[in-house]
Image (cartoon, rainbow, N blue to C red):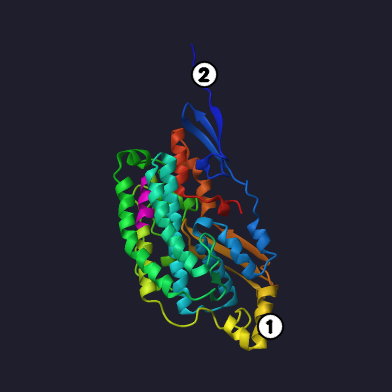
Amino acid sequence: MSTQTKTMLLNMGPHHPATHGVLRLELELEGETIVRAHPHVGYLHRGFEKMAEHKTAQQIIPLTDRLDYAAASANNLGFCTAVEKLLGLEVPKRAQYLRVIMAELARIMSHQLWLGTHALDIGAMTPIFYAFADRELAMDITEEASGYRLTPSYMRIGGVSQDITPEFVRKVREFVRKMPKAIDGYHQLLTQNAIWMKRTKGIGVIPADTAVDYGFTGPSLRGSGIAYDVRKAAPYSSYEDFDFQIPIGEDGDTYDRYLVRMEEFTQSVRIIEQAIENLPPGPIMADNPWTTSPDLEAVRHNADDLIRRFKIASQGFAFPPGETYHAVEGAKGELGFYLVGNGENHPYRMKIRSPGYYLVSALPYLVKGHMIADVITLIGSIDIVLGEVDR
């Protein structure tokens, strides 16, 4: 008598909350064990890259906010630095430090969103309340600088949109003082929690060489033991001025990816504290009449400045012939912008190297052989935002 084994196909998502709304996973199951998985992306149809090829640089900045809306300032920074590299534009030191503060706040906000939803996916409800309450503090600072909480569009080509206020400084110092206690609270809730450890240790192990082969970057790569961070490997925006560590994991499992992000909370707070205490004086915009709008005070007293501000705002400026690639360390990994200019006031071509796309491609490897309940854990552990995956 022979026994015949059959597998079952199951679609997880795109509307399952744990698939973040727009990711569909085609799972082949043998009982509750994953035999094969195939991720399907493409439900957003945003077309950011093609839209950007018809817009001026200033019009593209709000688009970048919406790539990874959980860490919008990092996307602003990546695009602006790529354009500045193409133009050969030098950004004032004060603006560079302000950009660093905003980018690290974005990293913290992204990790808080990840922490709360990842824990909720696995079944722990309490962390999301604490993480979101603390996230409000960072959003208040973002609002103080830009007027917006989620999509600040604070950065400009050549600097930032406006200087900070004394209230901004006060809020940043208060944030830096409160965050260590908040991080301790996150650890108390999860790090030694028996259920959390059971659900994350040994789940979704990816060795260092395999992670590199899949194009992993960011905390997911560092969880596999590779200390690659764009802020250290190719410093930009004055990151070389700050003292901070790159945390790495040992086993490359879900628990290590969790620990790496938890330590990155602390390191980002250290960077913000150094930046606000050593904030240089001086201008916040590069001195370049072809790309930089005159400030409102100059416009009130000079007709030429008024005309120049109108022209830059309405027509933009030319992307010089040539090509460039520049990357920053986003909250989820290396975020790069490839630009081709041909003298028009919009990029001839723009391609984005988003970390999430590479992380999604590894899901079949990560989930194979695990139980179906672990799929939810693994999607959370690589921390994807589909806005930057399906662009």
Q: What residue type is labelled 2?
A: Gln
Tell me, yes or no, if residue 247 can be seen here.
Answer: no
Instruction: Give the labeled residue for mark 2.
Output: 4
Instruction: Give the labeled residue for mark 1.
Output: 307
Element under disc 2: loop
Q: Which of 10 and 157 is in front in this view?
A: 157
The residue under the point 59% across, 45% down is 41
Position of 297 relative to 274 (above/below): below
The residue under the point 51% across, 30% down is 29
Q: Quadrant of the C terminus?
A: bottom right
User: Disc 2 and disc 1: Cα gap in Å?
Assistant: 79 Å
Label 2 crowd (10 A; few <14 / some 14-19 / many >=20): few
State the extent of the magenta-drawn residues as a range: 255-264
Please indicate whether residue 43 sits to the left or right of residue 267 in the image.
right
Mark earlier in primary sequence (2, 1): 2
* Residue 228 at x, y percent in the picture: 41, 60
